[in-house]
Structures are given as C-alpha cells and as structure tokens.
Amino acid sequence: MIRTGFFVYAWFAAASFALSLLYFGYFFVVRLRQPAASEGAWHSLAVDVGLFGLFAIHHSLMARTGAKRWLTRFVPVALERATYVWIASVLFAAVCAFWQDLPGTVYMVMGSWRWASLAIQSAGLLLIAHAAAILDPLELVGVRQAAVAFSAEDAVNRSESLRIQGAYAWVRHPIYLGWALTVFGAPEMTVTRFAFAIISTAYLLIAIPWEERMMVETFGADYRRYVAEVRWRLVPGLY
C-alpha cells in the first residue's frame, strides 16, 4: 500500500511537471505574442521580475543539500525529488499565469529570416530533449527514486555518477543553452517575450556558479576533472 502511494505521488509530480511545460508552451507562443497597452510598463516589469524571482529562489535554494535534508524531515527521502518537482511545477505555472504584459515589439522577422529563427528554436528544443534524456527524465522528476525505494535498503541514497556524453561533452549546461536558444529564437519578439527571455536567462547565468559549487560538493574530484575537460559552461568559445 505504501509503495503504491509512493508511485502515485511521484507520477502525479511528473504529470504536474509535464502540464506546467505544456502551459508554458501556450504562454510563450500565444500569450506573449501580442504587446500590451502602453500604461504601467515599469510596474509590470517589476511584477515580472518579482514573480520569476520567487520561482528562482525555490529552484536554487531547494536544490541545495541542506535544504534537501530539511525537506526530508517532512517527507520520505524517496519522495524528496518528487516533492521538489511538485512545488517547482506549481510555481512555474503561477509565473506564467500572472506574468504582466509589456507594450511594444523589439523586432519581427519575415521570410527566410523567420525560418532561420524557427530553426534556432527547434535546435534549442532538441538540445533540451537530448540533454534531459541523458540525465534520465524519470530521475529528474522523482519517479525513479520512488520506484527504487523498496528494491534495496540504500537504493535512494545510492552513489551517483556523472554522465559525460553527448552535449555534456561540449558544454557543462546544455539544457540551459537549449533554453536560451528557444526563448531568444522567437521570430516575433514582443517586449513582453523579450523581458521573459532576458529575466529567465539572467537567472540561469546567476544560478550556474551556484549549481556548480553544489556539484563539487556532490561529486568532488570527479566534477573538478569534468570542469577541466569541458571548459565551457554554456556557449563554446565564449562562456
């Protein structure tokens, strides 16, 4: 009975994550396509920064080892990741739901340039899917942890290993690179969409050093060797 409950909880967390991504697709493609009226631009921008800031605080803070230990005081270790995914999915959907529109359009490309923009977006989405597949999507959403909780006494706390293959052999954060290509590749760049792209990518740039310190805490010398072998964090030859 407990095992079934773990599975249900974890799979619902996975479903919430999938739904939040689908809602984001609607939000980015449809909602952000039309510029707003001219009133209240600075107020709207401040709200948008605050909204994404709340999501970013949770996304980074709860990924820390200490925060994970605190969370397991309230939920089983096997459900720690799924609980994190639940909360992150709800917060991300809330960011999209309450995002404030801004007036104006930065640019709009047509003809062959439009197809080039769409190709950039497609490349970003494929890169995200490729990199996530290497990391194991079921592990990312917490289903794998719930599934192995009853297979062995130390299954959840099993030693992790770095997966250095595919895009991870070129840059250390290919999912983030894919995100940047996706949000900046839009052929119709309203100010609202551009603000979302800037704010979300700025958070990723700020989060990368933080996350890499956490990776050093987790993997130690193995991650330091990985950093030495794969120099670039996000963009080959640049950063």
Image: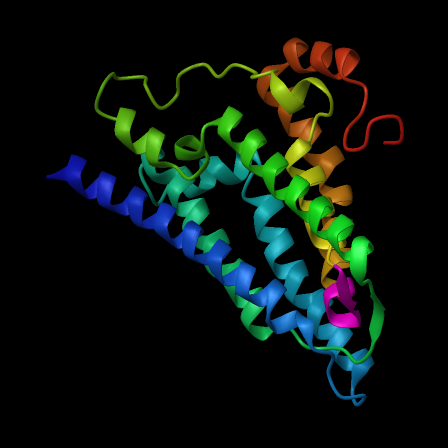
Magenta span includes 189 = yes
Instruction: Name the foreground residue: 173 vs 130.
Output: 130
User: In the displayed structure, would residue 123 be above or below residue 15?
Assistant: above
Residue at position x 79%, y 71% in the image: 191
Residue at position x 77%, y 73% in the image: 45
Magenta span includes 137 = no
Instruction: Name the foreground residue: 15 vs 44.
Output: 15
Query: Where the N terminus falls, by quadrant?
Result: top left
Query: Where the C terminus falls, by quadrant?
Result: top right
Q: Residue 177: image x %, image y %? A: 72, 38
Q: Residue 25: image x %, image y %? A: 55, 59
Way the structure is coloured: rainbow
Instruction: Name the foreground residue: 217 vs 32.
Output: 32
Q: Is residue 105 left or right of residue 143?
A: right
User: In the displayed structure, would residue 176 be above or below residue 20?
Assistant: above
User: In the displayed structure, would residue 163 be above or below residue 81?
Assistant: above
Task: Work out whether residue 72 can be spotted.
Answer: no
Q: Residue 214: image x %, image y %? A: 64, 28
Q: Residue 129: image x %, image y %? A: 54, 36
Residue at the extreme left: 1
Task: Work out whether residue 217 can be spotted.
Answer: yes
User: In the displayed structure, would residue 226 be above or below residue 16?
Assistant: above
Count of picture labels? 0
Instruction: Provide the residue span drawn in magenta.
Output: 187-194
Residue at the extreme front: 111
| Residue 190 figure quarter | bottom right
Residue at position x 60%, y 57% in the image: 55
Residue at position x 77%, y 43% in the image: 205
Q: Is residue 82 left or right of residue 226?
A: left
